[in-house]
Image: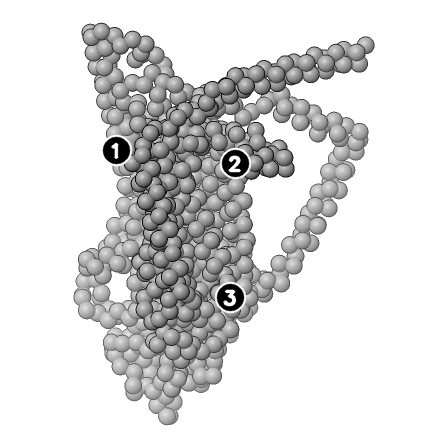
Amino acid sequence: MIRRAVAYLDRGTGASPLLRKTLRYAFPDHWSFLLGEVALYSFIVLVATGIYLTLFFEPSLAKTTYNGVYAPLRGMEMSQAYKSVVDISYERNAGLLFRQTHHWAADVFVAAVILHLIRVFFTGAFRRPRTLIWTIGLLMLFTSLLEGYLGYSMVDDLLSGMGLAIGYAVAMSTPVIGANLALGIWGAPYPGAHAFESRMYIAHVLIFPALIATLLALHLALVVRHHHTQFRTSPRATEKRLLGLPTLPAYAPRSLGLMLAVAALLFLLGGLVQINPIWQWGPYEVSQGTNGAQPDWYLGWLIGALRLVPGFDLTVGDYTLVGNPFWGGALFPLVVLLVLLAVPAAERRITRDGSTHNIADRPRDAPGRTAFGMAFLTWVALIFVAGSADRMYVFLGLSYEGQIWFYRVASLVLPFVAYLVTRRVCHALQEAGRIEADAAAAGAKTSTDPPGRDCNAPDAGTGDVRWGT
Amino acid sequence: MKRFVLTLLAIINGLRRRRERIGAREEEARREEGPIVPPGPHAPRAELAVALLLFAAALCGAGFIVVYAVGGDWNRTQLQGITLGGAFAFLAIALITVGKHLVSEEEVEDSYHDPEHPSEQERIDKIVEESASGITRKKLLITAGGAAGAAVGLAAITPALTLGPLLDTDELRETPWRRGLRLIGEDGKPLFAGQVEEETFYTAFPEHADRDLIGSPVVVVRLAPEQLRLPPERAKWAPLGIVAFSKVCTHAGCAIALYRKPTFKPTQPRPALVCPCHYSTFDPARGGEVIFGPAGRPLPQLPLVVGGDGILRAGGNFSGQVGPAYGTVRSRRPT
């Protein structure tokens, strides 16, 4: 049976040598290497549930009156878009399950991508020859943020309308061309032309997914080309030789199992944990706003940045050169993206090391990089947390203004503290490892030497180097 | 002579490659004599567990179909999630059990290759260079090519102007407010000056206007007249201490949905209009100036008058442009 299928394939494509190689392709094994896979599998769930939703969603801002089963909205005027999503939630069998699973999958996808990014950063896996993989991954992440924003914006509920108002203001605040840019995208002054809904729709269901899928394919192809990095788990794992589980028999079942586990998690969340109950927000009107509204988590850093910036527009005489939303809504994410894009080249320059690295560092092995990473992470995380200051005011009664001033100062000071502390900890861990290794070496010398193992050999696993086990 | 040497080299090269190919094939054949994959562990209990898990997945899948098919007015979403998610979960555990307990966990070796091929790079460079070797007037062609590229590129993106009024931003100044227009409340009825109370806020629109324009909604509050500190030229804009401002935040365009009346002195010294998006805080007593938060401009104020019928009317257009900042937002008046 298998023989015949392989023969059929080989006759048609001549791919059996490639297939055989693929079946014995080696995957270095470490739990942190699975984060990227979780992202990949969330993306698959996103596409599958998304296709289902496009079959029922109506991307139209034409007004209609709601007469469906959800009583509190009956008789209200709303757009076709909003009505169709309420209908998906209430009147399409399994519609709510797929809608909520889609939303959860987006949240998990971005979370997995960012954890994956953090792992790659702290292990130095962005170094040559994988620099291009890092770049493509970053572009994918930022495209995905926009994709998620469009996804919940085109529903035209009150919350998404507020998000679009902010997006419009950020576009308007772009120096010099802001007004033209915003009018071009929206088609008319805010809330924009009806065509704007179609523009969001085609971008969300076709253009951006195609872009992400293309980048994803390139990302994976390059990972296959260069092989995965590995930790120095045994003396046999070197810069030239990698050790890993082959696709068959060991790795494929595990990875497919992970895919199904991700799907299981997302569908359980989609079925059991409510997310974005748009029928509670109501349809969007320019004159309406809700208090305590929070966007999806992955935009929290932008909300925080928009809130932290002191109140000023940059003006030259009467001319407004830079509107305030630009700082937090455009410049801040741009700086984060550019810094991350520049990381591989900057590290090459600082360490004067342009060689290829296939062995992943432990964070302590590169104290400078790890300390910088922690400082950068602290900076972004503090700005992210600042976005919740209003909730802290409601729950804990902490003065909102006081909190904002705290975060303004903390986001400038604490990154330096994080840098110094991290570097110190890295050095201490290195020191501890050295002492341990010396003790082990001394112990080995006094007792009978274990045959065939020399702790001082350059590739030998010393006591603290068994990070991967 | 040269041709002869080249031919010789080609033959030698071909021979060498054939020898290599034969070598690889032999090695493969040798390897395939024995088993390629070492035998997996003997684990009948794990096999049984996997079988049970697969049956459980099948059961969940069937359960989903039943839940989907059975109609009625009950919370199906939860059961659909449990059955479909459960099916995936059992399949996942089954597969991971197979990977961990039923198959060999041998490690294989592979080698990392340096991706760079310096000689190939050189050759490509040469091919491109030599392809253009017959061209004599390179500079002319490059200039002409640049001109063609620029013009055709511009032509290709010109239709983007159709997207919106890209070059004409005058529309941004427009608001539906005109002198004498009545203020209409959210309930669609005119707003009487007498019904406006202190310590709360009202949303109003110009009569006959589209409510979904950014220039339409205003927020109306009443302050004690002695609290007012309006700029002198706006002295007559607040009959009975009633003031109106654009309801659209000058920071990011959200609706001003919070009115903070002073309940706690140290942090809330006076009434304030607050945007719930980024907490820009505006002072209605001082003509909408920014007290706190990221907004860079005051809220545009709408002059009010009370008609003979006691209904609030606009005394003109806003004091400044409505909505978020852009280039000429400060230099042009609303129309």
Q: Nearer the viewer, mark 3 or mark 2?
A: 2
Dot label at residue A59: 3
Calculate the distance from the C-alpha at mark 3 to the C-alpha at mark 1: 51 Å
* Neighbourhood count class around disc 2 (C-alpha, 10 Å): few under 14, some 14–19, many 20 upward: few
Circle nearer the N terminus (2, 1): 2
Q: Secondary structure at mark 3?
A: loop
The residue positioned 27% from the left and 52% from the top of the image is A405
Q: With A133 as the anchor, is B59 left or right in this view? A: left
Q: Amino acid at mark 1?
A: Val
Dot label at residue A421: 1
Q: Please provide percent x and percent y for residue A430.
A: 27, 23
Q: Are marks 3 and 2 in contact (CB under 8 Å)?
A: no
Q: Please provide percent x and percent y for residue A213.
A: 52, 46
The residue positioned 58% from the left and 19% from the top of the image is B25
Q: Amino acid at mark 3?
A: Pro
The residue positioned 57% from the left and 31% from the top of the image is A16
Q: Secondary structure at mark 2?
A: helix
The residue positioned 29% from the left and 86% from the top of the image is B195
Q: Is residue A5 above or below residue B82?
A: above
Calculate the distance from the C-alpha at mark 3 to the C-alpha at mark 2: 46 Å
Tally the numbered discs. 3
Q: Nearer the viewer, mark 3 or mark 1?
A: 3
> Do the residues indicated by labels 3 and 1 lie within the same chain of the protein?
yes
Dot label at residue A2: 2
